Amino acid sequence: MRGIYKYFGGVHALENVDFELYPQEIVALVGDNGAGKSTLIKIISGVYTADRGEIYLEGKRIQIQSPSDARALGIETVYQELALVETRDVAANFFLGREPTKGRSGIFIDKKKVEEVTVRTLKKLSITLPSLRTAVRYLSGGQRQALAVGRAIAWGRKIIIMDEPTAALGVEESRKVLGLVRQLKEHGASVIVISHNLRHVFSVAERIIVLRGGKRIGSKLKSETSGDEIVKLITGAELI
């Protein structure tokens, strides 16, 4: 992404922001509330369109006008709200409107294929859930995150955006979810992680991009920075 601008009335939500993501890389996007993180990922995922700027994927300039455009390009966002239907079971939530069908009419859901894909993906990611028939409302926060991540992998996504993946999770569930983030890379995906938890950021990210006031302040390799430096970039303390 080059020179991205986004305005909401007189508010400059993003101003001349560059953003890059390399194959099988885990990048963390950090900044205080209002820094522009959510706006940037919503442009990548097709919820918003940039007012100015260019977006490239694998060297080709692309247009992302809607979430369906993003999905067609292999981009999936796992939002903090997760977009799961609590009254439906694990297998049903794996597809949600993209169910495979059978028969000439194409109106009958192929439940066997639904279960096969769900089981295969959960096994590949070493995700353990009570049952495919368990309603989502009975799953823990970590199990819900795992389900949402598994769904993204099942659809063969190249880029997976994870919005606050460990928010409201306990220590053990956070550890498991962070392990899943690492597995996404192993399975060929590039990952963008948005998080306020710098300890979690440093445990998974290879590179950290800092936004402040709608501008890109810096990009640091994890191996060449520290938590203190990132905090200073986030808060602007380096200017004092």
Image: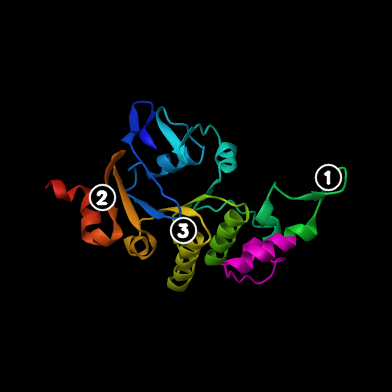
Q: Is residue 212 left or right of residue 48?
A: left
Q: Residues under labels 3 and 2: Cα distance?
A: 20 Å
Q: Is residue 130 magenta?
A: yes
Query: How far separated are the C-alphas under marks 1 and 2?
Result: 51 Å
**Vertical side of 75 occupied by 138: above or below:** below
Counting residues from the start of the chain, the first of labels 1 and 2 encountered is 1
Q: Can you tell which mark lies on residue 140?
A: none
Disc ID at residue 234? 2
130 or 101: nearer the eye?
Answer: 101
**Which residue range is magenta in the image?**
115-140
Q: Residue 167's image quarter?
A: bottom left
User: Which quarter of the image is occupied by the N terminus?
Assistant: top left
Could you tell me if residue 89 is visible in this image? no
Amino acid type at mark 3: Pro
Query: What residue is pinned by disc 1?
Result: 107
The disc labelled 2 sits on which kind of residue? Ile
Q: Give the residue type that dot 1 points to.
A: Ile
**Residue 201 appears in view:** yes
Residue extending furthest right? 104
How many numbered discs, if any? 3
Give the image's coloring scheme.
rainbow
